[in-house]
Image (cartoon, rainbow, N blue to C red):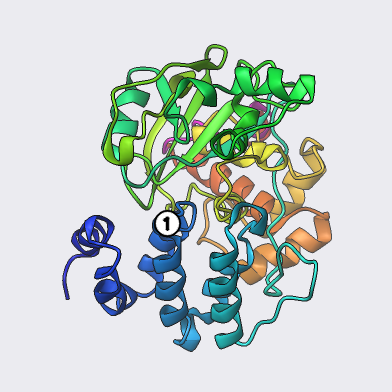
């Protein structure tokens, strides 16, 4: 079996008429390929192929639920009619049906709850071009996070905003560009300076990076690249975290689920604490935002000593119910406490927890 990265590169650069020849080879990588095809669903040039690969992967009962979750999360408002038909056919093959007038469906898998982030800071996911990932990454490292759908002066989001405000008509190109409108730091519902942006599959597929917005949106056309795309939409940024495997333990289930939608830019502020946790800057709190109390530490470490064997998930879950905390919150508190008492790195351990452990 060929290396998945090699297969993806070959398929991405293949002629549309012959790309289908790579379907079965990519699908043979199973769960690993699901992540890559999830990324490709965001690109109109690759989406039809990605749907076919995912449908083939979903024929394996072990991967069916994961494939349905990916296909069900697609925002149909951003798909052309022929791709909606492809999507419906794939879901039907996998035993799922979309009721009329529904934009998305649920595969029945509950989304893990998020952790509260810091007040006054918003958190976002931004997808970029799977065709030009090395270029996007090189620009991001130069403090310019670029987005596609900007290849002429008329596609400047600020210019489009003026047209919309006057009630004017937009061209098809401007409609396509306007889907990235929340990149405008001056928009009421847009990104703000100081917000954090998570970029899936950057610098390469299966990895993610985190940036801080360091300046206002600007429109700056670069030299034409493949398909004459010039990536004019730019956010000045500071790189905070580089190339983390999205399957790493530090990436919570909640954050991983929020990376699934294919929309170009969307808010994940409800999972801001999961991003802070990934950065190692989070003073652990549960999803309700309540700090841990000494009595909770006593219950946790009295039943599950920090210097003992790692508890099972069933033990964590039972205690989580008793404390009215999330499973992740209980597990993380125990892991931070265990790291601290053993002298291992505990950079994310809260000061109240350290002080309690020191006294006890």
At 56% from the left and 56% from the top, the residue drawn is: 260
What percent of the width, then of the height, locates residue 158? 62, 17
- Whole-percent x and y of residue 350? 63, 31
* Residue at the (36%, 34%) spot, across then down: 229
In the visual, does 249 lie left or right of 292?
Answer: left
Quadrant where the C terminus sits is top right
Q: Position of residue 261 (x, y in %)?
A: 59, 54
Q: In the picture, residue 239 is in which quadrant?
A: top left
Q: Quadrant of the N terminus?
A: bottom left
| Magenta stretch, main secondary structure class | loop
The number of numbered badges drawn on the structure is: 1
* Side of 90 relative to 4 (left or right): right
Residue 206: x, y in percent? Answer: 37, 53
The part of the image, by quadrant, that contains residue 93 is bottom right
Let me know if residue 19 appears in the view: yes
Q: Secondary structure at mark 1?
A: helix
Write the residue at 28% across / 69% down: 17
The reply to whether the magenta stretch includes residue 346 is yes
Instruction: Indicate yes or no whether the magenta region holds residue 150.
Output: no
Residue 109 lies in quadrant: bottom right
Q: Which residue is at the front of the view, 338 or 218? A: 218
Q: From the viewer's perspective, is residue 203 above or below residue 281?
A: below
Q: Is residue 312 visible?
A: no
Q: Is residue 191 above or below residue 3?
A: above
| Residue identified by numbered label 1 | 40
In the displayed structure image, the side of residue 31 where residue 314 appears, left or right: right
Tell me which segment is drawn in magenta: 344-353
What residue is drawn where x is 53% and y is 26%?
Answer: 155
Is 229 on the left or on the right of 217, as rendered?
A: left
């Amino acid at each position: 079996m060929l290396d998945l990265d090699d297969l993806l590169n070959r398929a991405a650069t293949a002629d549309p008429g012959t790309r289908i020849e790579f379907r079965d080879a990519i699908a043979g990588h199973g769960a690993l390929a699901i992540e890559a095809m999830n990324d490709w669903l965001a690109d109109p040039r690759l989406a039809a192929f990605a749907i076919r690969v995912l449908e083939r992967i979903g024929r394996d009962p072990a991967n069916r639920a994961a494939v349905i979750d990916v296909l069900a999360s697609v925002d149909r408002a951003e798909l052309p009619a022929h791709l909606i038909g492809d999507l419906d056919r794939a879901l039907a093959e996998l035993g799922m049906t979309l009721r009329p007038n529904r934009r998305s469906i649920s595969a029945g898998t509950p989304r893990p709850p998020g952790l509260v982030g810091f007040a006054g800071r918003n958190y976002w996911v931004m997808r970029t071009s799977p065709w030009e990932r090395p270029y996007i990454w090189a620009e991001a490292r130069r403090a310019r996070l670029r987005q596609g759908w900007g290849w002429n002066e008329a596609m400047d989001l600020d210019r489009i905003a003026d047209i919309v405000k006057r009630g004017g008509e937009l061209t098809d190109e401007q409609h396509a560009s306007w889907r990235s409108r929340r990149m405008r730091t001056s928009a009421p519902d847009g990104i703000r300076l100081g917000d954090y942006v998570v970029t899936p599959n950057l610098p390469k597929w299966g990895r993610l990076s985190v940036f801080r917005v360091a300046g206002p949106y600007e429109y700056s056309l670069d030299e034409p690249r493949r398909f004459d795309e010039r990536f004019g939409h730019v956010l000045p940024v500071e790189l905070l975290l580089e190339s983390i495997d999205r399957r790493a333990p530090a990436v919570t289930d909640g954050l991983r689920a929020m990376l699934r939608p294919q929309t170009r830019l969307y808010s994940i502020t409800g999972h801001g604490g999961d991003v802070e946790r990934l950065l190692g800057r989070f003073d652990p709190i549960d999803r309700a935002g309540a700090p841990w109390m000494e009595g909770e530490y006593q219950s946790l470490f009295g039943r599950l000593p920090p210097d003992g064997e790692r508890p099972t998930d069933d033990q964590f879950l039972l205690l989580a119910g008793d404390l009215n905390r999330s499973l992740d919150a209980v597990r993380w508190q125990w892991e931070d406490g265990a790291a601290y008492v053993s002298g291992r790195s505990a950079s994310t351990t809260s000061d109240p927890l350290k002080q309690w452990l020191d006294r006890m």
